[in-house]
Amino acid sequence: MMVLVTYDVNTETVKGRKRLRQVAKVCVDYGQRVQNSVFECSVTPAEFVEIKSELLSIIDSESDSIRFYLLGKNWQNRVETLGRDDSYDPDVGVLLL
């Protein structure tokens, strides 16, 4: 299933900037960055539980927030882009030469 992960981490402190880097690193492990704090993640239900758990262990729930948008299997019909589109389709194989 396709999940859109968005986050807002308070970076006013050194600890906040560290949390921001940690959140981004976890998201990179599961998906592709499409904007600064937005990731498209093609995950299984079990991986979705994992990513939520990992992110919850990092953030400060008093000052940070993470939102998950469940786009499902037919996500291509739910995404519309205006302007430059460097998106990818994780369901299509990649050929490396």
Image (cartoon, rainbow, N blue to C red):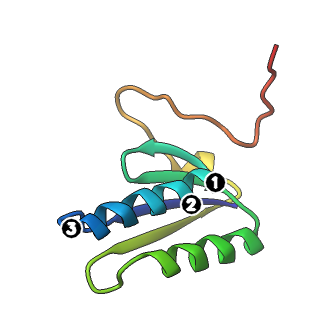
Give the amino acid at mark 3.
Thr
In the image, residue 61 lies at what x, y percent? 35, 84
In the image, residue 14 lies at what x, y percent? 26, 64
Q: Is residue 89 left or right of residue 86?
A: right
Residue 96, located in which quarter of the rendered image? top right
| Residues at circles 3 and 1 in contact by the CB criterion of under 8 Å | no
Camera-side residue of 88 and 56: 56
Choose the circle earlier in sequence order: 3 or 1.
3
Q: How far apart in space, not on screen, are marks 3 and 1 (Cα)? A: 25 Å
Structural crowding at the residue carrying mark 3, measured as other residues with C-alpha within 10 Å and reported as few (<14), some (14–19) or many (≥20): few
Q: How far apart in space, not on screen, are marks 3 and 2 (Cα)? A: 20 Å
Secondary structure at badge 3 equals loop
Camera-side residue of 36 and 57: 57
Return the residue at label 1. 29
Structural crowding at the residue carrying mark 2, measured as other residues with C-alpha within 10 Å and reported as few (<14), some (14–19) or many (≥20): some
Give the amino acid at mark 2.
Val
Q: How far apart in space, not on screen, are marks 2 and 1 (Cα)? A: 5 Å
Secondary structure at badge 1 equals helix
Give the amino acid at mark 1.
Asp
Furthest-left residue in this view: 12
User: Is 83 placed above or below 90 here?
Assistant: above
Image point (63%, 54%), residue name: 29
Camera-side residue of 64 and 46: 64
Image point (50%, 66%), residue name: 69
Return the residue at label 2. 26
Return the residue at label 3. 13
| Residues at circles 2 and 1 in contact by the CB criterion of under 8 Å | yes
Camera-side residue of 89 and 94: 94
Furthest-bottom residue in this view: 62
Image point (81%, 22%), residue name: 95
Structural crowding at the residue carrying mark 1, measured as other residues with C-alpha within 10 Å and reported as few (<14), some (14–19) or many (≥20): few
Quadrant of the image containing the N terminus: bottom right
